[in-house]
Amino acid sequence: MPRYFFTRFCCLILGVGSVVAASFEKANEQFRAADFTGAASTYEKVLTETGPNAATYYNLGNAYQSLKQYGPAILAYERARLLKPRDPDLRANLALARKDSGIYEDSGRPAWVENVLTYLSRRECSWLLVGAACTLGLLIFLNGLVRLPKTWLLSVSLLSSLFILGTASLLWVRRGESQLGVIVAPEAHIRLSPFEKAESVASPSPGRMVRLGERNRDFYYVEVPGANLNGWVASRDVAPLIPTEAR
Amino acid sequence: MRLLITLVGMANFAHAAAVEATLDRESAPAGSGGILSIRITGGSAGEPVIPEVPNFIIQPRGQSRQIQMMNGQTSVSLTYNYVVGSNSPGVYQIPSIEVLIDGKKNHTEPLTFTVLDSGFTPPAAPSPPAGTTPPSAPPPPESEETRFGFLTVELAASERKHVYVGEIAPVRIRAWLPADSQAQLRSGIQPESKAFTLHHVSEQPEQTQEIKDGKRYTVLTWFGGMSATKAGNFPASLSVDATVAVRDTTAPKPPKRQRSGPFADPFFDNVFEDMSVPMVQKDVTMKSVDQEIEVRPLPTEGRPAGFTGAVGQFKFDRVEIPTTWRTGEPQQISARLSGSGNFALMKAPELTPVESWKTYPGKDEFTPGDQASFSGSKNFQFSAVPRKGGAQEAALKFSYFDPAAESYKTLTSDSKALQVSGQDLVEAVAPVEEPPVKAPEKKPPSLVAQRETLSATASLVPLVAQPSFAIWLGAAGLLGLLGRLLSFFRARRENPQRLALAALETATREALATAERCAAARDAAGYFAAARLALQHRLGSRWGQSAQAITLAEISSRLPADSPVTRFFLEADRYEYSRASHGEILPEWRALLEAALASLTSPVR
């Protein structure tokens, strides 16, 4: 029995892979045939089957953008950006979606600072930090075992320390990103209290990024970055940038 | 006759003291009357001193104060109103009225008021001035359209029933407003048809009082020039938007009441009746009567090559061309053309012979000769460069269309002899003009294409937010800690001082072991030699010297005489000098050695 396990496991993996690839291709064909609703549905299915995937999120954003559903489109693009932060096509389509939705995101920082800060995703920063820390730890361990050349030891230690300092600073500056969410409903309301009939203080545009706070039943407490605006939004109208189930 | 008279100068200055007297009409039937207003501006004024006029009534009718703010300046004026009139027809002179302003006496100009016979019929409209066509006849004054006023346009008289494109005609535009009305213009005067344009309309209209068809009007008069822009038959009418308030003559009149005191005279009945009539206000567009005019295009036949569009009658007033030139070097030429016509279309005259000169656009300045800017003069200044050297003659040429003669005319200034030094200019070949590149049409931004292949799957949650992040960092820290421990132990192991100490201890132990062996063998000499060596090792490590270099003399100099070390060394020397080869090791020797070793052990680690 164990001798067939590996063969069966490989067959299962390959089979699932081919099914997912076929679904992705089918969604692309639907998109090309201007069946954007069908394409979006199929892309969602692919994501459920494969897990987060930059290409699928990107295509899903395009499908929603074609349907003029800017909220879900921007959410999909932003999720794709978590995985591929420097994709120029992605940035272009995201900017287009924001423009069409009438959203102007301003972090309040100069553009060049913003470009530097967002050049790497938090995921990449984390890996860089871990890589630099492990390199430094390993180096110290090896130096404990055998005496390493002093110049070499010093330069690598300095480089690793710089990486650790830089990436840790970046992660600290962008620590709030894990709480971000996107308004997905075309007519969402920020209310004074977590009740459907509470007074609406603002109607954010679909695609607007908000900072999610505590959750009270079916409402999220949100703050709109860059604006002195906060309140409660129905959880059906807003989606966390990082899905709750993925956390 | 002007009804409005400014009596004291300096009225243009907002803060200067001034007093003026005005009559709202220059005549009235006997038994009726008019209003005399004395307006005082600037300074603190006293009440006007009204002189007596025989058979003429001047009765106070109240006063009002007006405050105006214009361009940040505030002006305050005080107006005293008087009812004036008489029951006896005749011409009455209202003498100069004295007003005390800031302690200074100011006087108004005398005014004349005519009291007409009760059966008087107002005169017909005044005849238009010579040289103009009669104003377009206003509709009957009592019609609803003209109740709030109307507009007339008087064009320059002409035998022709047509005009040419570009031709300009002076016009007098008159807005007729009921005399007792209040009006505010809401727009500028504008042609009704797009085929005409209005130029140089005077900014401030002249204001007069006139009687037309038995009704008194306040007439505002503007002057301007009207020109046709395209050929065809078009109505040459103008219009202006205004808000006009007039007395509502249809309103029921209040019952007459018996007056007493100075107003007991029946004369005041009509006056007060007029003033008690309510006002009615309306936004109106005053439009002149349509007067269709044929506009003809300028003839193409006989059009001179240098014609640039000037229409009218012109002549050269002055031409200034320098007499000495150098090829390739520009100099200024100036000329002044005067006449009447459309100066806006007038371009600079041409320098001839054309092939000998290259000219550049210059500047021009128009000086109007009348209110309508129909006549005047235009100065031109432009630069020219001679292309050919040698002696030559130059003149300015100007072509225009004369609408009166209905033909083109060309003016040529007197030829001027010039001397041009330098070689003839060789003209660069003019570059072939490339067809204009059509700018690409700006397309609206569209989505960038789909991804065709699946990319690698990854977690949306960054590593920093995952528990493994801490594990990774912990592992890295642990590795580092382990490495530091290893380094510490290796450094400790490889410390030369520690190694030297260990070697010394070993040597000391070996020497003591040798001493013990000698003691067992009753070899006292060997015992002392080994024991002394052990002490020398200890002293050597303590003093940083070689063990063999330490002698009794040095020990005696550095240690007290009663120290066990000194005493042991003395004992060893004593035994050595006794020349005994074998013997029992005395217990006191052993005790002394132990004491010596103990005294050296604690400080030396």
Image (cartoon, coloured by chain):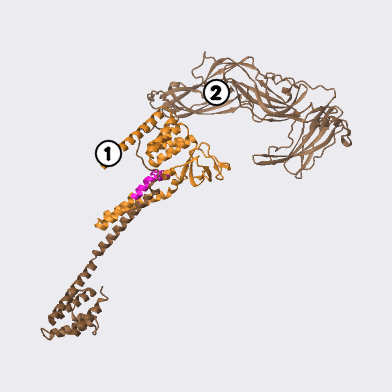
Chain colours: A orange, B brown
User: Which residue is situated farthest in the front direction here?
Assistant: A1
Quarter-wise, where is residue B594 in the image? Answer: bottom left
Q: Position of residue B142 (x, y in %)?
A: 76, 22
- Provide the secondary structure element on which disc 2 rests: helix
User: Which residue is situated farthest in the top direction here?
Assistant: B301
Nearer to me, B3 or B440: B440
Which residue does the numbered mark 1 point to in the structure image? A7
Which residue does the numbered mark 2 point to in the structure image? B345
The circle on residue B241 is none
Side of B402 where B74 appears, left or right:
right
Eye-nearest disc, 1 or 2: 1
Question: From what the image shows, is residue B40 above or below residue B551?
Answer: above
Side of A74 where B174 appears, left or right:
right
Nearer to me, B187 or A151: A151
User: What is the chain letter for disc 2?
Assistant: B
Work out how far the residue at label 1 is from the one at label 2, CA to CA, in angstroms.
Answer: 95 Å
Quarter-wise, where is residue A199 in the image? Answer: top right
- Residue B571 in view of the camera: yes
User: Which residue is situated farthest in the bottom direction here?
Assistant: B578
Question: From what the image shows, is residue B582 above or below residue B389?
Answer: below
Residue at image coords 25%, 55%? A149
| Magenta region, residue range | A114-130
Task: Kindly identify the amino acid type of the residue bearing the numbered disc 1.
Answer: Thr
Task: Kindly identify the amino acid type of the residue bearing the numbered disc 2.
Answer: Leu
Q: Quadrant of the C terminus of chain B?
A: bottom left
Q: Position of residue B314 (x, y in %)?
A: 57, 21
- Residue A159 in view of the camera: no
